[in-house]
């Protein structure tokens, strides 16, 4: 497998697992870097992309105010909303990165690369208790807010995925393996991915 | 991991994968044998168990006709329907088998053993095309009937799982890993399971 895409529930350690896998396989790891790279290539402002990444569904007025100031147009020549522009810019970057072996976390990469046979599409999830523990201990969030943050982040990821794909975030059909990092542990989850990726 | 439970979509090769894993780990494999074992211990007729295994939802009249002729009673002393009697008999056998390392395919084993930390709970799935191919080539079914058979079998398994557990068949929360045998291949799927089970 040349490319490993990782989708993940918030607090499941997907980012850490992605970094471990990339280290073990000696390939680049892409995550937030994607956004910056997308910005550089598309001419979209980094701030707009970051804001868009956080707030997928924005008001019509905001779209209207900002909509036509960027460069992407669709096939009919009509200007696209900012959401779609950002998605297309990220897709272009993912396609470029995927020309050489790498690990890509998030950003609908599994969907964007769905027709390639050299891509291992992984989804990481975990039980609530493990995730809340990680959110507090690793991400440094307030314990009283951890569960709400988890629910909100998952909802945002699901909405973003479902907005730009014809499928459901986390549904097994979209992936080659779904691994429970709460049960398997972070290190072992990375090992399982590497064991398969190395052999194929 | 001492015990590996495998849930699986019809035609995904879960049974073959289970046998391979058991061979590689040198532990017993249980599947249809469970039914016979359950029958021997419970006094339920093998035919009744096999029929029940195929047709989970039967008519009230059939239950009425056959209901009280078997031995299981619930805590209040009332006789249980045949479905429940068979499930309880199978559960007893699974609990007994799980006293020593083994692979158990189907029969809600993941649910029955959900509170044990030495159990690796696996679910095997695959794309429709791979499954239809396997149903025709490996199981020898008529190509024109393969897809219908697949849908019916999955529905039956889902119904059986959901009748006796408080959860949904194939939902990721119930498992430690979900593996797409259509993408990974039968041998490699077994290898991934063994790699993890051996180390833990």
Image: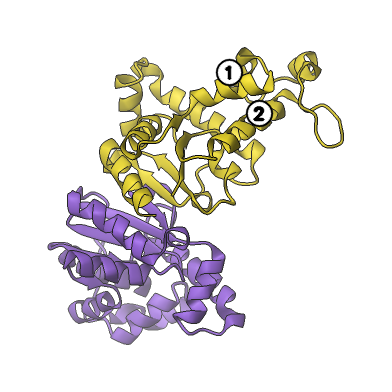
Chain colours: A purple, B yellow
- The image position of residue A41, as x and y in percent, is 18, 77
User: Is residue A63 left or right of B58 when viewed as pictured?
Assistant: left
Q: Residue furthest front?
A: B100
Do the residues bearing badges 1 and 2 touch, measured as CB atoms within 8 Å?
A: no
Circle 1: element type = helix
| Residue appearing at x 36%, y 39% in the figure | B126
| Position of B69 relative to B4 (above/below) | above
Which quarter of the figure has residue A124?
bottom left
In the image shown, does A153 or A191 lie closer to the viewer? A191
Say what secondary structure mark 2 lies in.
Answer: helix
Q: Chain of mark 2?
A: B
Q: Residue at x 30, y 67 (%)?
A: A18
Q: Is residue B60 left or right of residue B11?
A: right
Could you say where residue B98 lies in the image, as x and y percent from the top left?
A: 53, 39
Give the percent coordinates (x, y) of residue A43: 22, 81
Alpha carbon distance from label 1 to label 2:
13 Å
Question: Measuring 71% from the left and 30% from the top, which residue is drawn there?
Answer: B84
Q: Which of the two residues, B51 or A73, is positioned nearer the viewer here?
A: B51
Task: Give the crowd class for mark 1: few <14, some 14-19, many >=20 residues within 10 Å.
Answer: some
The total number of labels drawn is 2
Residue for badge 2:
B89
Label whose residue precedes the other's in the sequence (1 or 2): 1
Q: Is B62 on the left-hand or right-hand side of B107?
A: right
* Residue B7 visible somewhere in the drawing: no
Residue marked by disc 1: B50
Residue A28, which numbered label?
none
* Crowding near the residue tagged with mark 2, few <14, some 14–19, many ≥20 C-alpha atoms within 10 Å: many
Chain of the residue where label 1 is placed in the rendered structure? B
Residue that appears at 46% across and 64% down: A159
User: Considering depth in this image, is A124 or A105 the residue closer to the camera?
Assistant: A124
| Residue B12, x across and y down, in percent | 37, 33
């Amino acid at each position: 497998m040349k490319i490993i895409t990782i989708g993940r529930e918030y607090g499941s350690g997907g980012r850490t697992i992605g970094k471990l896998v990339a280290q073990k396989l000696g390939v680049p790891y892409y995550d937030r870097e994607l956004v910056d790279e997308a910005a550089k290539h598309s001419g979209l402002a980094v701030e707009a992309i970051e804001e868009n990444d956080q707030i997928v569904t924005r008001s019509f007025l905001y779209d209207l105010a900002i909509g036509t100031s960027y460069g992407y147009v669709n096939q009919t020549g009509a200007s696209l909303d900012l959401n779609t522009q950002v998605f297309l810019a990220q897709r272009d970057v993912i396609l470029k990165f995927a020309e050489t072996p790498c690990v890509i976390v998030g950003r609908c990469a599994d969907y964007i690369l769905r027709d390639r046979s050299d891509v291992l599409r992984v989804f990481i999830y975990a039980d609530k208790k493990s995730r809340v523990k990680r959110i507090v201990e690793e991400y440094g969030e307030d314990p009283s807010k951890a569960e709400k943050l988890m629910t909100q982040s998952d909802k945002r990821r699901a909405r973003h995925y479902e907005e730009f794909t014809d499928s459901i975030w986390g549904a097994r059909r979209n992936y080659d393996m779904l691994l429970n990092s709460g049960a398997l542990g972070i290190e072992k989850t990375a090992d399982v991915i590497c064991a398969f990726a190395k052999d194929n």
